[in-house]
Image: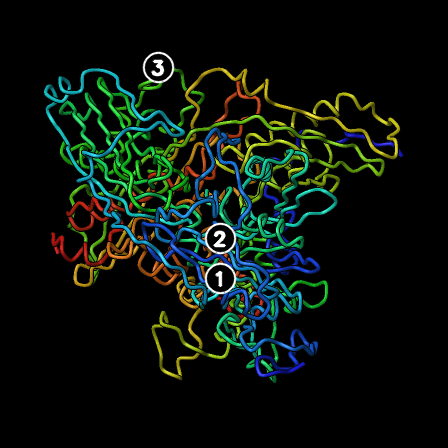
Amino acid sequence: MASSTSSDLTLSVNGEKYTLTVDHRTTLLDALRERLDLTGTKKGCDQGQCGACTVLVDGRRSVACLQLAVAAEGHEITTVEGVADGDRLHPVQQAFLDLDGFQCGYCTPGQICSAVAVIEEHAAGWPSAATADLRPEAGPPPLTPEEIRERMSGNLCRCGAYMSIVQAVARAAEANGAAA
Amino acid sequence: MTTATTGRSAADRVTGTAHTRVEGRDKVTGAARYAAEIPFAELAHGWLVLSTVARGRVRALDTDTVLAMPGVLTVLTHHNAPRVDTDFVGMLGVPPDPGTALFQHDRVPHRGWPVALVVADTPEQAREAAETLVVHYDEEPHDVAFSAGREAEAYPVDGHMPAVMEKGDLDRELAASAVVVDAEYTTPEEHHNPMEPHAATARWEGGRLEVVDSNQGTHWVAGDLAKLFSLDPGTVRVRSEHVGGGFGSKGVRAHQVAAVMAATVLHRPVRVVMTRRQMFSLAGYRSPTAQRVRLGADPDGRLRALEHRSLNQTSTVHEFVEPSAATGRSMYAADAHHTVSRLVRLDVPTPTWMRAPGEAPGSFALESALDELAEKCGVDPIDLRLRNEPAVGPVSGLPFAGRNLVACFREGARRFGWAERDPRPGVRREGRWLLGTGTAAASFPAMAMPSTASVTAEADGTFTIRINAADIGTGARTALTLIAADALDVPTDRVLVRIGDSDLGPAMVAGGSAGTRSWAWAVMAAAEELRRGLAPGADIPPQGITVRSDTTEAVGALAQKERHSFGAQFAEVAVDPATGEVRVRRMLGVFAAGRIVNPLTARNQLVGGMIWGLSMALHEEAVREPASGGVYGADLAGYHVAAHADVPHVEADWVDDPDPDDPVGIKGIGEVGTVGAAAAIANAVWHATGVRHRDLPIRPDRILSAGGDA
């Protein structure tokens, strides 16, 4: 029941609608983890510095700890639980699994959501700080390891699985037609 | 039904072949649940309140205001918290960190000391109430200023290594040396920062205390909790299935004790999770070090004298020594060999083990000093190390159980292209960059600790392995699956490994690079006995056939030897003398680390260790503010750990390192990758610029103020 400190809202997550009453202080991250039992999205710092809670909001990556649940209504949220096609892993997930793109696995959902968006951002021609030729007519830059590292730098991995994460993103991007 | 454990040829062995993680699918889909993610009915949420002064006493807490806030269930303080007993020695042979004696008295020994736990129905309520709680202190002057100048107050303490070891006449050998290096090095306060914050949920269920936690050893945590709360050990169960990194920080800490206290008082499940900021004072850390190394050598670089003195800080309530000076004891022959690790007590949190404790900072100093000696002698840094290879332990006199450091250097030098290296510093330019390369040696003890395991032949033809291991990202669960499959001579898909539950019995923690070595030993012992006892085609009863092992005797019978993994680290750096920026361009580590069980995860872990060395060399530094006694910017923005863009091509590989006399042959790879990596980078920065950097991290301002050949 809504009150002066809470609201009723409907969240759209991984194609499903969830209706719930949330404390206005509740972040999207806590709503996912504590209310919807979608614990795949991780809490590493709770202040937007580590990327572990990266989700896709209307297809764009976003850290779920820095937005309030009440502000997420009306947007389509995709979490790591929603990127696979049923039992068939998303190419990014498959590449992370095959190439060992993780160790403890805690940053992994955020890395995977970020990587899914990176591949789409790159395909759409978005440059990064590592892009040499920024002219619009230059088209998407080659998705080199430097490009991937730059674009993935918002996602920390304390185990230091960066080498295999970059390889996994490159392999998944290749499957998507973006050979470096 | 019947089962068989035969039918595979030796060529079918799975150890030594790449295998993706058995829990990998759960980790890439988000299905793997970590400690704070297991649902409990009626769960309450605890939020720790930490002191805002660095020394003094809690005079009063305005708990009434907070207890009246919505959802607040209780506020635990030193006035009302259950009593705990800290007068014991835990599984790892040390008394509990006094930080686990929560709310037992009014003294505040450091900033960030827990003074209260607020428990409420929701995390939002608990957080707001905790932030509202006003605590009044009688503040006393504090002292958090660590420096080499504190030597006069310091004293040696034996930690997991003896503090002092001396052989030969140091002064005489130094006097007789043609070349002497005498240099001081410092490393800063460093924090583990596993990505998953410490989290525990406690509840009483059917007369037992159950704790779902994130830790490096449930047997350890359960045992200490039983002692703290004076409980029968059998009544405490701790589970820790998936652990989001540990690196030494995930032992017995304030969050578990707080959760148990609150669950006991409230008679309902309580979860306590550390915030990232709280981890900077509650999760342990690596002490800053101030080290002095004196090397005396003949003109050809042969060592006559090796002296390494190290100083670290600890709290006023616990002696923790970072044994940085011990790193050289097994590395280099010298006629006189003096090493001492000492500490000074300050009003700071208690440090703890952090990946390669002692070896990481110690190897930075010693391997930098060897590079300086090579420069002074005009000897190639690799040749210098080869000239000082010991035939037996330089101090112990014990034989080595495999010492393949030379093979690591030879293979590493070949692959890195070391032979083409111009030894002169500061002569390679590429645009705005000065380029340089460096090398360093690595070593880490190969320990083993007693463990128990059981292997069950199930009626359906599968095998269940029960071993209280912890997989904190090491790949232990997968490695043990491969070990068991080979010991039973069955495919991996017929093996299920259960870990991370204190009900599985005593076992080594994930620490000291000794986890997989110790657990594999117990699994092999049980599996081999089961296999011997199972007649081909024998009937398996519905409850299965179980064999248990305990390696206490076997580990104790291991011959006294110098047992270590070794490695050769190489790095290439680019330094911009105008901005002070240092970029690592590539790293190569070649290791001799016994039998490699799973090359896929082993390479990842060794590379991860090397990246820790890179992060230590260039980025990580927690600065204590003298006025408050706390860490400036205690979060992942203020404390930078290497990010994707900081990490270039990092490659790890290994040479054959068999030890036919060792029953397991595994040496452990969790820490050796970090050892020497920072020194290799610092030596490369010298080679690029001609300036020695003896203080970590090598920040841009240090490059700029050092000047040099820019």
Q: Return the chain for callout 3.
A: B
Tell me the residue that label 2 is attached to: B77
Q: Amino acid at mark 1?
A: Thr
Q: Quadrant of residue B217?
A: top right
| Label 1 secondary element | helix
Dot 1: few (<14), some (14–19), or many (≥20) neighbours within 10 Å?
many
The reply to whether callout 1 and callout 2 are in contact (CB within 8 Å) is yes
> Can residue B600 be seen in this snapshot?
no
Q: Position of residue B220 (x, y in %)?
A: 56, 36
Q: Nearer the viewer, residue B647 or A180?
A: B647
Name the residue carrying label 3: B397
Give the CA distance from mark 3 to mark 2.
53 Å
Q: Which corner quadrant of the image does residue A15 belong to? A: bottom right
x, y (%) of residue A94? Answer: 62, 59
Q: CA distance from mark 1 to mark 2?
A: 9 Å
Residue type of the residue flagged with mark 3: Gly
